[in-house]
Amino acid sequence: MITDILITILGAALVLVGADKLTDGSVGLARRFNIPELVIGLTIVAFGTSLPEFIVSLLASINHAPAMSIGNIVGSNVFNTLMIVGFSAAVCPIVVSKGTVAKDIPLSVLASVVLPALALDAIVGSSAGNVLSRGDGIVLLGFFVIFMAYTFSMVKGDSADPSSSSAAEPPMSGLKISLFILLGLAGLIGGGQLFVSGATGIARSLGVSEAVIGLTLVAGGTSLPELATSVIAARKGQSAMAIGNVVGSNLFNIFWILGCCACITPLPVEGIEWTDFTMLFVGNLLFWVFARTSHRVNRIEGILLVACYVGYIAYLISQA
């Protein structure tokens, strides 16, 4: 099992480095073509922090480990809303804008309702059992298109100050952009393969289901970019970035990643229980409720969110 642990750690490191380099290269490419900074932040950077989840879930579904694929996304979103928001708020209270409370966080709550509504087919008497079908994947991608259309409509309506862009930064060379993108892709694909292989080996060695490994170890590992980004942003007083990172990642994870994976191959919902989907919804709901109070998440509320996550992980381990 030690070999599997080392493979998992190596895979996680390669995935994280790959995501970082691919994001840097993509941002450099966007700046080279004068794409506005706000658009970069809402699309390329948001997608970049979700790339580890995308690669791991995609490879898990292709390698016939659907429980790990879905568990990774559900676990990552629970980690995002409880641990990342909670820990960031505990470090420094997070100010939440009225627009985020009124529009963005409700979209994350909606995603936490849409996913179980599509996945838990057995409650409506489906003979096929609980499965995310290709049709469900198309529905999720449809929600993603709506989300992106909404995002770009907000960008068009935002009179951003041109001086706020990084025009003073020297543009990245074409060779460096190409190198970063190629290295990033190589790290993501190779690291993702190693990570899934090692995590699956650990699950089998411990006799723990792939779903539990996906909800805990894999979810925590693939959420490291979001954790680092949000905590650093909170310490710098950049609350909008900390909150936007979490909300954007949640929506990318459910609508884009699971939508793509389900379209490629139907995903049986094995080992993901009502408890997990309930925690997904409750985490988003608590985040929304706390954000509505004075439009901020204070330290006490942050500690409460972290405590909820610790309790959830303790429950998963006890059931395993």
Image: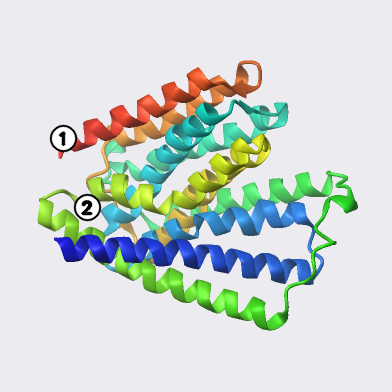
Q: Position of residue 2 (x, y in %)?
A: 16, 61
Q: Secondary structure at mark 1?
A: helix
- Judged from this view, the residue extending furthest toward the bottom is 175
Q: Secondary structure at mark 2?
A: helix
Seen from the viewer's position, the closer of residues 43 and 258 is 43
Is residue 60 among what the camera can see? Answer: no
Q: Position of residue 113 (x, y in %)?
A: 45, 35
Seen from the viewer's position, the closer of residues 226 and 126 is 226
- Which of the marked residues, 1 or 2, is nearer the chain's N terminus? 2
Seen from the viewer's position, the closer of residues 241 and 64 is 241
Q: Amino acid at mark 2?
A: Glu
Residue at 71 percent across and 31 percent down: it is 99
Q: Position of residue 251 (x, y in %)?
A: 54, 46
Give the quadrant of residue 21: bottom right
Q: CA distance from mark 1 to mark 2?
A: 13 Å
Residue at 67 percent across and 38 percent down: it is 238
The image quadrant where one finds the C terminus is top left
* Left or right, residue 118 beside residue 148: left
Tag 2 residue: 210
Q: Are marks 1 and 2 in contact (CB under 8 Å)?
A: no
Is residue 18 among what the camera can see? Answer: yes
The image quadrant where one finds the N terminus is bottom left
Q: Is residue 210 above or below residue 237?
A: below
Residue at 27 percent across and 44 percent down: it is 126
Crowd rating for badge 1 (residues with CA inside 10 Å; few <14, some 14–19, many 20+): few
Q: Amino acid at mark 1?
A: Gln
Tag 1 residue: 319
Crowd rating for badge 2 (residues with CA inside 10 Å; few <14, some 14–19, many 20+): many
